[in-house]
Image (cartoon, grey):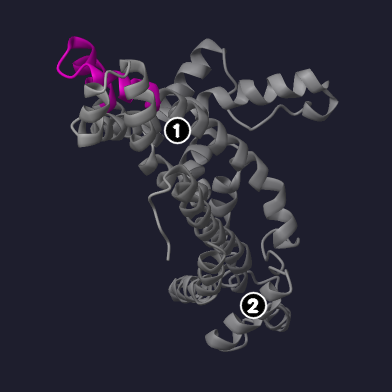
Amino acid sequence: MGRYVLRRLVNAVPLIIGITFISFVVVDLAPGDFFTSLKMNPQISPETLQGMEAKYGFDKPLVVRFFLWFWRVLHLDLGESIFYHVDVLSLIGRFLPNTVILSAAAMVVSWGLAVPLGLFMALRPGTWADRLLSFFAFMGMSIPSFFFALLLLIFALQTGWFPTGGSFSPDYDTLSLAGKVWDRVHHLILPVVVLGTSGVAGLMRLMRGNVMEIMNADYVRTARAKGLPERVVVFKHILRNAINPFITIAGYELGALFGGAALVEAVLHLQGMGNLMLQAVLSQDLFLLMGSILIGAVLLIVGNLLADIALKFADPRIRYE
């Protein structure tokens, strides 16, 4: 296992270089840059613009700019945001916790519902409960997240039951510890419902399919033939093997922290990475965008590695030699 982890970490280096270089090229291929709009401002002299371009390295060739940026990354310096004029790492550190909290809460809700509901459906195939839950699952998968977020936003505006924007209240810092926890939970309800609905729908169908496939396995029939209680057969032999694909999915979920909640954050006006990356794209803030892509790539690689390690402990039959 140690050699396997070391090999994966070594292979991650050229992978990160490739991901960031391709992203750097794609961003550079977009028409214009951050300074294009400034050039149309007659109050800014060409000399000032040239100085700003030289400060951020835009007067150098693409390949040179990339390796200068990557050299700074090796020294844990993601550069300075051109739009916000602050350090990219500190800026991401301010917005990332809100996205992590939202994504983690949505994952807990979706997994906490999908696993038991999928197991319940698989143990009662063809019943009215199975058909009803399957109907809601297909409906949840077919509704776009941004559209569902808009519907809930309208509902919140009409009822006043939930906040209509933000990850916390303006007076958050003045609240007590219990008040801060409740304020966070209150602001999380709508986005968690949006993200959790789509997550439950897909995971529930996956769990149902896995359980129904494993129920016909030889070792399950052998366990029943030995006279084991049905509860032991279900939880020890069926559920334990059906849960393996979910461990792999968890690795991808860690890397999807940015993308999964980005659109919902933009619709519900949350202070997370979604809105930050949207602003970086609109303003063509190269260093902020590349810093976000880099962290997303690292999270994806680390998440898959942790998932593979967890899968090894969950299923001793798996070998990584």
Q: On the rendered image, what quadrant is the C terminus found in?
A: bottom left
Residue 150: % across, % down: 43, 29
Q: Secondary structure at mark 2?
A: helix
- Residue at 60% x, 22% y is 163
Q: Is residue 253 above or below residue 51?
A: above
- Residue furthest to the front in view is 226
Q: CA distance from mark 2 to mark 1?
A: 34 Å
Residue 71: % across, % down: 67, 80
Q: Which mark is residue 136?
A: none
Q: Is residue 122 visible?
A: no
Q: Is residue 288 above or below residue 263?
A: below
Image quadrant of residue 272?
A: top right
| Label pair 2/1, CB-CB below 8 angstroms | no
Amino acid identity at mark 1: Leu
Q: Which residues are magenta?
A: 114-137
Image quadrant of residue 211?
A: top left
In the image shown, does 125 or 290 lie closer to the viewer?
125
Q: Secondary structure at mark 1?
A: helix
Q: Is residue 11 visible?
A: yes
In the image shown, does 304 or 48 lie closer to the viewer?
304
- Identify residue for label 2: 69
Q: Residue 135 magenta-drawn?
A: yes
- Identify residue for label 1: 195
Question: Is 72 on the left or on the right of 20, as rendered?
Answer: right
Numbered-mark total: 2
In the image shown, does 103 or 266 lie closer to the viewer?
103
Q: Is residue 113 above or below residue 87?
A: above
Amino acid identity at mark 2: Trp
Helix, strand or loop for the magenta stretch, by majority: helix
